[in-house]
Amino acid sequence: MTSSRWQAHGNVYLVAESDEYVMAPGLDGVMQVLSVEGDDVTVAIVNPDGSLAEMSGNGTRIAAAWLMVRTGSRVAHVHVGGRVVEVRRTSEGLYESEMGEVEVGNPETVEGITFTPVDVGNPHAVVHDDPAKLDWIGPLLETHPHFPNRTNVQVAVAAASFGAGEVLVHFPGGDLRVRLHDGRATLIGPAEVCDDP
């Protein structure tokens, strides 16, 4: 079995080249490599509980960076959850991901918490509130029956807060540049190996 640990903005994923892997403590998931063909990689994102995720911006950058290390290319196409995300390595050593269409819904309220639904290939509930409350708001909304397939819970994500243009989003693991244009999103951020790939 060949696998390596990678991180992007503090999200740690194991990139596994087979279905034989161990979901070790501290992992945010596994990027299971299903196939590689040139600059294209097809992956499945496995959550710590064994369920499949539709998409992960950080995970997608990790899969692309992993492939670029192998190929020496500055571009990769990541096939995941029904989408193909084109990722380019910038001159700054960051990864620019064309995430595709962004759907921003009307505000909703669940359990007294108001949020904006955002879909970028996977569902997000964006709460316009104090980030310190995320520790209890996150678990409450993530598994609430209102979201039968679960949701990501975040505070003030760019697409829900800004209509278009480029913004810098501050995460505990570093800054992410988000470019919103014509209903689509581009993410520009880091991805790096935690151990030898």
Image: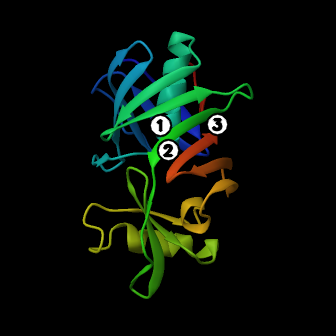
Q: CA distance from mark 3 to mark 1?
A: 11 Å
Q: Residues within 10 Å of mark 1 (few under 14, many from 20)?
A: many
Which element carries disc 2, helix, strand or loop?
helix
- Dot placed on the residue nearer the N-terminal end, 3 or 1: 1
Q: Amino acid at mark 1?
A: Thr
Q: Are marks 1 and 2 in contact (CB under 8 Å)?
A: yes
Q: Residues within 10 Å of mark 2 (few under 14, many from 20)?
A: some
In the figure, 37 relative to 169: above or below?
Answer: above
- Residue shown at 57% from the left, 62% from the top: 157
* Residue extending farthest bottom: 112
Evaluate whether residue 193 shows in this view. no
- Residue shown at 47% from the left, 81% from the top: 114
* Residue 141 image position (x, y, % from top left): 40, 72
**Residue 123 shown left or right of residue 178 in the figure:** left
Q: Nearer the viewer, residue 177 or 34?
A: 177
Instruction: Answer with the quarter of the image where residue 42 lies.
Output: top left
Evaluate whether residue 140 shows in this view. yes
Q: CA distance from mark 1 to mark 2?
A: 5 Å
Q: Which mark is residue 190?
A: 3
Q: Nearer the viewer, residue 30 or 120?
A: 120
Q: Amino acid at mark 2?
A: Gly
* Residue extending farthest right: 92
Which residue is identified by label 2? 57
Q: Amino acid at mark 3?
A: Pro
Q: Residues within 10 Å of mark 3 (few under 14, many from 20)?
A: many
* Residue extending farthest front: 182
- Residue shown at 38% from the left, 67% from the top: 142
Q: CA distance from mark 2 to mark 3?
A: 11 Å
* Residue 164 image position (x, y, % from top left): 62, 58
Which residue is identified by label 1? 60
Q: Quadrant of the N terminus?
A: top left
